[in-house]
Image (tube, rainbow, N blue to C red):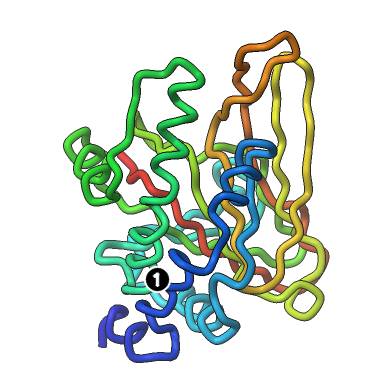
Amino acid sequence: MNTATDISTTTADPARAERRASRSFDWSAIEASLDARGNAVLPQVLSAAQCGQIAALYSRDDCFRSRIVMARHNFGRGEYKYFAYPLPPLLHKLRHALYPYLAPIANRWNAQMGLDVRYPLELAAFLDECHRAGQTRPTPLILEYGAGDYNCLHQDLYGEHVFPLQMAILLSQPGRDFEGGEFVMTETASSGQHAEVIALEQGDAVLFTVNQRPAAGKRGGTRKVVMRHGVSQIRSGKRHTLGLIFHDAR
């Protein structure tokens, strides 16, 4: 039985998740948070049952294209797996449902920063651009951390075509499944550095900046803020996270 059948026949209903992502959130508030802080939390994007079903996929090999052991690359400690195409329907629908809300923000940000790149308003058209440039490998992934594991601050770039926003959904419950393992973002600008710890519960998602965003300059105009993200050390238990990146990899 293939992964697509497994997901679509469980309680992780793709159509319900798509409706939840596209209609149940205050996108004006989300946009304001992204502008001000470079991130925004979307509560309960997935149910506990959906989180458990997605996390359970990690033990399988047939739905992933590769496995990365982070210590081998000095990325931290822990591991993750990239999904293969076709993505499970739930992930496919979430990715396509969210992108049209994010593309206008990405285009406005690029205009404010004086960048010429503009993004199509539908994900399929943007992925076509990625694939024509040789970025054909899917980037959605599941990360698995155990006690002592962590993720160094980094940016998920993968090639020339980079969509400036991405999402992480916490699949495990803090305090029950694991301790520690906070999601961390840093920003660096000419005015200095800043770090923020973002609290998430199981099923919550954080939208965040991939590499850079615009911010108001102290003397007017716009400055560029460089963003990175990571995960603090897991003190105990096991933590799973779903990552949704909108550009594909070379």
Looking at the picture, does residue 212 appear above or below residue 223? below
Looking at the picture, does residue 11 appear above or below residue 93? below
Residue located 49% across and 29% down the image:
109
Q: Point out the image quarter for the C terminus.
A: top left
Residue 15 vs residue 8, the one in the foreground: 15
Specify the amino acid type for callout 1.
Glu
Residue located 57% across and 45% down the image:
31
Image position of 154 (left or right of 56): right
Mark 1 residue element: helix
Q: Where residue 19 appears, x then y in whole percent?
A: 41, 73
Looking at the picture, does residue 133 appear above or below residue 116? below
Residue located 22% across and 37% down the image:
129
Image position of 1 (left or right of 182): left
Q: Where residue 162 appears, x then y in whole percent?
A: 39, 35
Residue located 26% across and 88% down the image:
1
Q: Where residue 144 appears, x then y in whole percent?
A: 59, 65
Residue 227 vs residue 30, the one in the foreground: 30
> Hey, which quadrant is residue 17 in on the image?
bottom left
Looking at the picture, does residue 249 appear above or below residue 14? above
Image position of 49 (left or right of 64): right
Write down the residue under mark 1.
18
Q: Where residue 193 appears, x then y in whole percent?
A: 78, 26
- Neighbour tally class for label 1: few under 14, some 14-19, many 20 plus, Cα within 10 Å: many
> Hey, which quadrant is residue 107 in on the image?
top left
